[in-house]
Amino acid sequence: MKRSFSQYGAPCGHVLVLMLAMALAGCKQEAAPVAAGPLQVTALTVEPRDTPVQFEFVAQTQSSREVQIQARVDGFLDRRLYHEGAMVRAGQPLFQMDRKPFMAALQTAEGQLAQQRARVEVTAANLARVRPLAARNAVSKKDLDDSVGAEKSARAAVISAEGEVRKAELNLGYTTIQSPLAGLSSFAKQQEGSYLTVGQQGLLTTVSQIDPIWVNFSVSENQKLGFTDQIAKGQLLFPKNMNFEVEVLLADGSAFPHRGRINFAAPSFDAQTGTFMVRTELPNPEGTLRPGQFVRARMVGAVRPAAVRVPQRAVQQGARSHYVWVIGNDGKARQRVVEVGDWYGDEWFINDGLKRGERVVVEGAGRVTPASALKVGTGTAQLARAEVAR
């Protein structure tokens, strides 16, 4: 049996129209706007507290005592007695000069001393004979005076000869050149066989004491003025008598195990650099620090009283100032201009603009507007307060 198109085509058309209408209805339903909810943020409550602070400076190590080892007499250098670059102890022989000329000079001086002592004996015996005769007027007064003068002259010559002997002994002792202190030795500037003369030409090496060692750093004029201003405003307290502890950080960021104290501060600024030098002394028993190293010196002991700190992510940068979002009693956030101070880890010190008990938006601060409806979380807020309390 044949069926016409009208018997089957009409129902198919109705089905297609119905499916298209349902699809369009679905699209319109998906495009319908969804009402926006309150903005999820977290906040911390401002709780000022005393906070220890530290100040870091680029520093350089220096030997606490550096001595130039020089020849004290002229002569030939015979031997070097130490290992270059090694630690040497106080009194350790470093160089040996040729002793023979000085031994001969000592022998000559001792011979001259013996002659003068013999002369004293002769003049003393002559005076002993003349005195009784002069008492009986058997000899003239001049003869007595001559005998007394000869005896005194002989004794004076003995003193002079003893001085020459002592000088010769010293010169002989100077041929063995010793280190006057314990420290790190440098390389030898003169080699065996060189003729040494007293003065700069006789410089042999240097010995640098490294325990204790000095660490020097400079404070700029701006930094000093900043410290003075903060102390005057009550925003900073230094330890009594500037009794800072100083911690040294090495090039790899590790902390040197021994701390030191400031033992000198320059009384005036350097005219060329605009800074004044501060010197720290600290123990260095293992010899880890060597003179000339660049390190970082961290001054420990200052305190910021009743300091306000907020995480860096809570502070926004405006066109002219920094600001934060403070949540009012009505639950709305209001923009508050603040004066930021120094960094403290990942937080800012807030010098002005916030008071105890105020709530500051931390997470989500970058999305807040004055018209935003806020939903303040609790878990992260407690974490933020814990971070501030550290």
Image: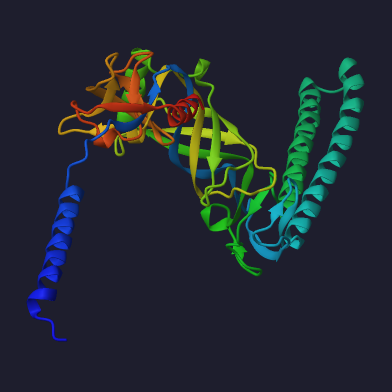
Quarter of the image with the N terminus is bottom left
Which is nearer the eye, 313 or 40? 40
Q: Is residue 333 above or below residue 180?
A: above
Residue 84, image x and y in percent?
66, 62
Q: Specify whether residue 154 is in view.
A: yes
Which is nearer the eye, 302 or 381? 381
User: Residue placed at 18% from the left, 56% from the top?
Assistant: 22
Q: Looking at the rendering, which quadrant does residue 65 occupy?
A: top right
Residue 130, image x and y in percent?
88, 25
Q: Is residue 360 above or below residue 169?
A: above
Which is nearer the eye, 205 or 59? 59
Residue 194, image x and y in percent?
61, 67
Q: Looking at the image, which residue sits at the far front?
A: 1
Which is nearer the eye, 139 or 56? 56
Horizontal relation, residue 166 to residue 121: left or right:
left
User: Residue placed at 86% from the left, 19% from the top?
Assistant: 134
User: Residue placed at 13% from the left, 57% from the top?
Assistant: 21
Q: How many marks?
A: 0
Residue 135, image x and y in percent?
88, 15
Horizontal relation, residue 263 to residue 98: left or right:
left
